[in-house]
Image (tube, helix red, strand yellow):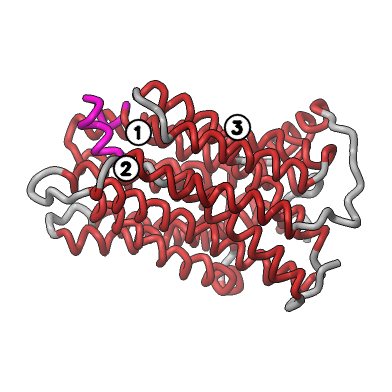
């Protein structure tokens, strides 16, 4: 086992964190560029958003198989394979010359991007001592956020300097480095025992989780939250690119700095769970999301930004509580239970734009706010329903 604060710990943790930064930078870098893609290819906001959301959709679907495959093939081997595929598809994206080609290679890229989220925590659990595991997971989650923010900021800046395709070159180079560092510094787990891959068992486990009311409600809460939250950023980008704001891709990318309050929300989730039942803590996060969304109705740019700072705090508070609740609640096959949560999470992210588009056509941003409040209302009811189910279960066990 790798102990905390050893050279092997720092090398392997650095390799994993660099890979996380690269994966999530690749996943999210197109989001602030969607108004520019819409203008260049003559697309509606929904059509342009497919260049972004097809990757999150394919990532979510891929999670269904990667965890089981890593049990059979080995964590490091599959991680290297998916990172190599990510690198090659990113290089291909630097050469696309049509929107259809862009969407195709983003879909291919998304399939490979799912490897790290599906495998990283499992590898840590087998390779690190408990203190090292706790520290490494914290670093890894921070790297996820850093990758998402830095990818968007870098893409916006490079698009203003030249062409939107320039955004893929730095992440392609970093992807090559991440493959090298994973190969060089990530040792194969000494306690790993290969298990035959069984598609049938994976389906049985997933079907079992979907039939557990507490898990299913949590999956829906996580999926519906991301269904709205991520796509609000997509549509506000079109608002800010138009008059009276007329912001460039760089300034639209800067809006994603609001994710930093999400880090605070995630960090506070443990304290909230100590003071409130977890379902009520999730409900609190949704209420904060509703408040932030209402503030974005202001015409003031600063109040819109404030609303998104509040939104990020509420979203990540609910997301952190929901993801930990899945692990606590699953009675078996915890890895597949957590993977299934992420499937709902990313499929929700990739499909929310379809739901919001008619509201956008109806009343532009005000319509998006109406649609968001309706869905957040549904999510809030699901949180309260989950709380009542938990109370009833606890009462029956007395």
Q: Quadrant of residue 313?
A: bottom left
Can residue 271 be seen here?
Answer: yes
Within 10 Å of disc 3 (Cα), the crowding (few <14, some 14-19, many 20+) is many
Location of the N terminus (image quadrant): bottom right
Within 10 Å of disc 2 (Cα), the crowding (few <14, some 14-19, many 20+) is many
Q: Which residues are magenta?
A: 33-47
Q: Which residue is mark 2?
A: 234
Query: Picture coordinates of residue 257 (x, y %)?
Result: 35, 62
Name the residue: 42% across, 42% down.
168
Q: Which residue is mark 3?
A: 61
Separation of residues labelled 1 and 2 (CA atoms): 7 Å
Along the line of sight, which residue is nearer the eye, 28 or 316?
28
Are discs 1 and 3 less than 8 Å apart at CB?
A: no
In the rendered view, tell whether residue 322 sits above or below residue 267: above
Along the line of sight, which residue is nearer the eye, 327 or 143?
143
Are discs 2 and 3 less than 8 Å apart at CB?
A: no
Mark 3 lies on a secondary structure that is helix
In the rendered view, tell whether residue 214 sits above or below residue 18: above
Q: Which residue is mark 1?
A: 49
Separation of residues labelled 1 and 3 (CA atoms): 18 Å
Name the residue: 67% across, 65% down.
13
Separation of residues labelled 2 and 3 (CA atoms): 22 Å
Q: Earlier in the sequence, mark 1 or mark 2?
A: 1
Q: Quadrant of residue 208?
A: top right
Are discs 1 and 2 less than 8 Å apart at CB?
A: yes
Q: Is residue 2 left or right of residue 83?
A: right
Mark 1 lies on a secondary structure that is helix
Within 10 Å of disc 1 (Cα), the crowding (few <14, some 14-19, many 20+) is many
Location of the C terminus (image quadrant): bottom right
Name the residue: 47% across, 24% down.
104
Q: Quadrant of residue 327?
A: bottom right
Q: Earlier in the sequence, mark 1 or mark 3?
A: 1
């Amino acid at each position: 086992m790798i102990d905390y604060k050893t050279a092997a710990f720092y090398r392997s943790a650095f390799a994993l964190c660099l890979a996380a930064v690269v994966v999530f930078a690749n996943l999210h870098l197109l989001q602030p560029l969607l108004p520019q893609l819409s203008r260049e290819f003559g697309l509606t906001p929904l059509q342009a958003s497919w260049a972004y959301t097809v990757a999150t959709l394919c990532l979510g679907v891929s999670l269904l198989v990667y965890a089981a495959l890593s049990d059979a093939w080995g964590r490091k081997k599959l991680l290297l394979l998916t990172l190599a595929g990510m690198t090659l598809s990113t290089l291909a994206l630097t050469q696309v010359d049509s929107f259809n080609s862009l969407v195709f290679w983003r879909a291919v890229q998304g399939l490979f991007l799912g490897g790290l989220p599906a495998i990283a925590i499992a590898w840590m659990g087998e390779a690190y001592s408990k203190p090292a595991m706790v520290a490494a997971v914290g670093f890894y989650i921070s790297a996820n956020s850093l990758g998402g923010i830095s990818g968007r900021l870098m893409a916006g800046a490079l698009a203003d300097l030249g062409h939107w395709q320039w955004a893929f070159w730095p992440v392609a180079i970093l992807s090559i480095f991440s493959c090298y560092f994973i190969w060089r510094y990530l040792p194969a787990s000494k306690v790993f025992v290969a298990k035959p891959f069984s598609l049938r068992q994976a389906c049985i486990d997933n079907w079992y989780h979907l039939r557990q009311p507490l898990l299913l409600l949590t999956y829906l809460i996580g999926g519906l939250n991301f269904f709205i939250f991520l796509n609000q950023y997509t549509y506000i980008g079109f608002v800010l690119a138009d008059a009276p704001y007329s912001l460039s891709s760089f300034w639209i990318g800067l809006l994603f700095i609001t994710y930093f309050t999400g880090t605070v929300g995630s960090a506070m989730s443990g304290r909230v769970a100590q003071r409130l039942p977890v379902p009520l803590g999730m409900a609190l996060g949704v209420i904060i999301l509703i408040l932030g969304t209402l503030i974005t109705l202001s015409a003031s740019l600063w109040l819109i930004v404030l609303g998104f700072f509040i939104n990020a705090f509420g979203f990540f508070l609910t997301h952190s509580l929901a993801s930990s609740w899945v692990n606590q609640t699953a009675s078996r096959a915890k890895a597949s239970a957590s993977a299934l949560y992420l499937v709902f999470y990313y499929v929700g992210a990739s499909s929310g734009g379809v739901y919001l588009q008619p509201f956008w056509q109806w009343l532009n941003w005000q319509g998006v706010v109406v649609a968001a409040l309706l869905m957040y209302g549904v999510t809030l009811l699901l949180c309260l329903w989950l709380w009542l189910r938990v109370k009833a279960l606890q009462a029956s066990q007395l």
